[in-house]
Amino acid sequence: MAAIPAPSYSDIRKAIAKGNLAPIYLLHGEEGYYIDELAKAFENLVPESERDFNLYTLYAPEVEPELVASTCRRYPMMAERQVVILKEAQSVRADQLNKLHVYASNPNPTTVLVICCRGAQAKGKDLIAQIKAHGGVIFESKKLTERNIDPVISGIIKEKGLNIEPKGLSMLRDFIGTDVAKMHNEINKLALILGPGAMITPESIEVNVGISKDYNNFELVDAIAAKNTAKIFTIINYFRSNPKHNPAILTVAAAFSYFSNLLIAHFTRDKSPGSLMSALGMKWQSQLSRYEQGMRNYNAYKTIEIISAIRDFDVKSKGIGSRQSEFDLLHDLMFRIVTAAGKIEI
């Protein structure tokens, strides 16, 4: 029998909206944003007028598991249910949290218990086993990575009833990084301004988010792929004059991501578009053009040399072996990229 997939953040939000509630929810994981938002959604199940009687917010380091269990066993006051939210559960020992397995083995059907382990994975094998065995829900809020950020941004945009151009997606990704809260805030802002069904374009991002459509990391990587030296240094000089919106560390991260993928492309045996897209985890064939161009301008040896230069930037930017400013280091890095000879020291 196939395993039932773990519910996503969207799945839980939809179930809450429909009133399809489990007796216990364990929300844990490194990404705190989704845990906080789900906790708010559970709080909103209880009307303001009933919160003094039917909503309990407890903090794991301050209460004993027995008190949590006895609170959950109470019956709601003139209402269908009560909600008990246990926060900061990541701050107590696993054996303490695990004591809740007794309650989890026989949960009160008129209580929704929400256990929040923000920023860490929950520990307590017995508790987890009992939650699974008695109709509870376990949601792991995983930290975003460079590899999975595009589908997350696309998913949020789709949920808001919007569409986005590929360049716009790259601009948002480079500007936001893996900051999920900022991601939701910026997309919510675009949804309010543009309205349902709108297409998010580079122009609308420039006007409403504050990212230049001509001077950004997307355009820089395109210029690097084309080995367009004049454009590369024009963009770098713009970044230097606008450091608040163009931190060098994000620019270097974009360059590292590009050359890491370029190395994968070089060593992918089948160079057909379909094979390269699969190897690089791409959705649109148009995304391949910068890699096809890059393979012509930077062979595998040059790519390896450039990745080494990026790592050298990372060390020096931390003040090790250099006192240059980050934008001086960035300027030097771009020079090393366009002049890479492909000489690898063994």
Image: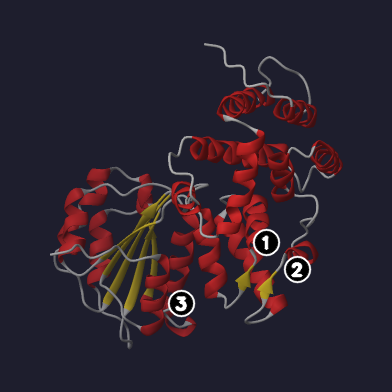
Residue 308, image quadrant: top right
Q: In the rendered image of this protein, does residue 121 appear above or below residue 152?
A: above
- Which mark sits nearer the N-terminus, 2 or 3? 3
Q: What is the residue that sits farthest to the bottom in this orientation?
A: 78
- Classed neighbour count for the residue bearing mark 3: other residues with Cα under 10 Å, few (<14), some (14–19), many (≥20): some
Q: Is mark 3 on a helix, strand or loop?
A: loop
Mark 2 = which residue? 204
Q: Which of marks 3 and 1 is in front?
A: 1
Judge the density around disc 2: few (<14), some (14-19), many (≥20) Cα neighbours within 10 Å. some
Residue at mark 1: 168
Amino acid of disc 2: Ser
Q: Where is residue 198 in the image (x, y as percent from the top left)?
A: 66, 78
Q: Where is residue 170 in the image (x, y as percent from the top left)?
A: 64, 55
Q: Please give the label number shown on residue 334.
A: none
Q: Looking at the image, which residue is at 23% across and 58% down? A: 66
Indicate the secondary structure of the residue bearing disc 2. Answer: helix
Residue toward you, 112 or 144: 144
Q: Nearer the viewer, residue 174 or 307?
A: 307
Q: Distance between the residues labelled 3 and 1?
A: 34 Å
Q: Which residue corresponds to mark 3?
A: 44
Residues at circles 2 and 1 in contact by the CB criterion of under 8 Å: yes
| Image quarter (top left, top right, bottom left or bottom right) of the N terminus | bottom left
